[in-house]
Amino acid sequence: LTEAIFAEVNAYLANKGMTLRSGTLVDATIIDAPSSTKNKAKARDPEMSSTKKGNDWYFGMKAHVGVDAESGTVHSLEATTAKVHDSRVWDELLHGDETSVWADKGYVSAEREAAFTGPGKVWGVMRKAPKGSDLHPIDARINRIIAMVRARVEHPFRVIKRQFGYVKTRYRGLAKNRAQLFTLFALGNLFLVRRRLMA
């Protein structure tokens, strides 16, 4: 049901001309889960897992999103346990009609880049320095441009975490939390374009 609500909201926004569906920004965020065992089962949620980001450890799940590059609204969503690497969820986040894709260094893949290239297509995945050497100045400049475009992918995450207060999972298991994410991002999409809707 929540996926249907998400699809209906996106169809409504598309009919209003608020999503262009030409470019997709891909990213993921960690949603913390209670790590405490002070519950009825006396155990942590077995469907959640730990992952390290920088120097910090997190326990929970990940929300992976495909975001319309123009409007900043989420058009695709997937949820996994936290230990799944961001790059493992890719095809599920693209709608297939993209002329550009934008992502951070975690999504670098020569195979994906080769499959995506073509006339009028832009591969906006941040460049990585070769092992043991510095990033070429041209690649560093390209990365700055990509970062400016990619900044919009953070807006839906900010809305569900700051405006809606969703910083921790509310249920046990991935299925229920995934369902809640569809509702949150559907509402988040409406929130992001609220001024245009009321104009």
Image: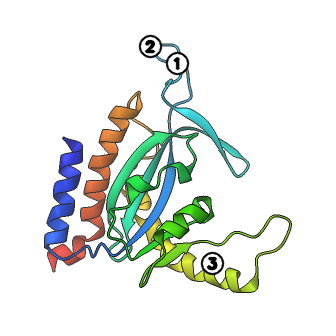
Q: Is residue 127 left or right of residue 103?
A: right
Q: 93 or 10, which is in the foreground?
A: 93
Q: Which residue is mark 3?
A: 143
User: Percent position (x, y) of residue 152?
Assistant: 44, 72
Q: Is residue 132 placed above or below 118 in the rendered structure?
A: above
Kind of element beneath mark 1: loop
Q: Which amino acid does the dot numbered 1 rest on? A: Lys
The residue located at (40%, 33%) in the rendering is: 174
Q: Which residue is mark 2?
A: 40
Q: Is residue 82 placed above or below 187 in the rendered structure?
A: above
The residue located at (44%, 13%) in the rendering is: 40
Q: Which residue is mark 1?
A: 38
Kind of element beneath mark 2: loop
The residue located at (38%, 77%) in the rendering is: 99
User: Percent position (x, y) of residue 11?
Assistant: 17, 62
Snapshot quadrant of residue 193: bottom left
Q: How many dots with numbers?
A: 3
